[in-house]
């Protein structure tokens, strides 16, 4: 399923589509608190390409040569270029903002442990799983992970605030 930046529930579809891949109206409504349950999982899969690394470097202003320069990177412990760790982590953010809980969810906290480098040509699966729901604070705890070939490249935990009710759709 194609990813897109997080939006608010009930957002303007035409304005959103100017900045993202095409979406259906249904994708603009995320889950509300009462619709969530422990164990719910969502994931997306993304290819790591030269273009994706370049665009991430431009967006983040992180032009560390271990990500951008093969000659430099080949002399490091990684023996070649690696993708930005936060590029992989951004796929978790994409799941949170577009799939589970989806539009309307707000990040409050994220921990991450990086286990293995990600390289051009790898396919990263970003996945979140609900592990705890606090109905009083409308906060949801998620296990977050990214995998390459079934092996963890990063994992952590996120705390997300989730809307209690749907906002009225704009006409």
Image (tube, rainbow, N blue to C red):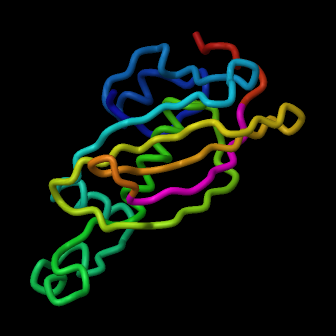
Residue 116 % position (x, y): 35, 67
Write down the quadrant of residue 161 in the picture: top right
Residue 61 % position (x, y): 36, 71
Q: Residue furthest top?
A: 171
Give the number of callouts.
0
Specify whether 152 is left or right of 30.
left
Specify whether 54 is left or right of 74.
right
Q: Nearer the viewer, residue 127 or 5?
A: 127
Specify whether 42 is left or right of 153.
right
Q: Residue furthest right?
A: 136
Q: The C terminus lies in which quarter of the figure?
A: top right
Magenta-colored stretch includes residue 139: no
Write down the quadrant of residue 23 in the picture: top left
Q: Residue at x 50, y 56 (%)?
A: 155
Q: Residue at x 42, y 62 (%)?
A: 86
Q: Residue at x 35, y 53 (%)?
A: 151
Magenta stretch bounds? 153-162
Q: Nearer the viewer, residue 108 or 125?
A: 125
Dominant secondary-structure state across the stretch colored magenta: strand
Magenta-colored stretch includes residue 161: yes
Specify whether 57 is left or right of 33.
left
Residue 26 % position (x, y): 49, 14
Position above or below: 34 against 112: above
Q: Residue furthest left?
A: 71
Q: Nearer the viewer, residue 113 or 84?
A: 113
Q: The N terminus lies in which quarter of the figure?
A: top left
Q: Residue at x 28, y 62 (%)?
A: 118
């Amino acid at each position: 399923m194609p990813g897109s930046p997080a939006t608010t529930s009930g957002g303007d579809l035409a304005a959103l589509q100017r900045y993202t891949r095409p979406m259906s109206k249904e994708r603009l409504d995320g889950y509300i608190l009462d619709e969530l349950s422990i164990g719910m999982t969502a994931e997306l899969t993304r290819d790591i390409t030269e273009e994706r690394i370049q665009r991430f470097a431009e967006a983040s202003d992180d032009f560390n040569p271990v990500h951008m320069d093969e000659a430099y990177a080949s002399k490091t412990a990684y023996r070649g270029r690696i993708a930005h760790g936060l590029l992989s982590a951004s796929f978790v953010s994409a799941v949170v903002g577009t799939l589970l809980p989806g539009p309307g969810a707000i990040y409050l906290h994220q921990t991450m442990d990086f286990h293995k480098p990600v390289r051009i040509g790898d396919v990263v699966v970003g996945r979140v799983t609900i592990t705890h729901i606090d109905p009083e604070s409308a906060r949801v705890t998620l296990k977050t992970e990214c995998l390459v070939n079934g092996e963890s490249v990063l994992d952590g935990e996120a705390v997300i605030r989730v809307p209690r009710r749907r906002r009225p759709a704009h006409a």
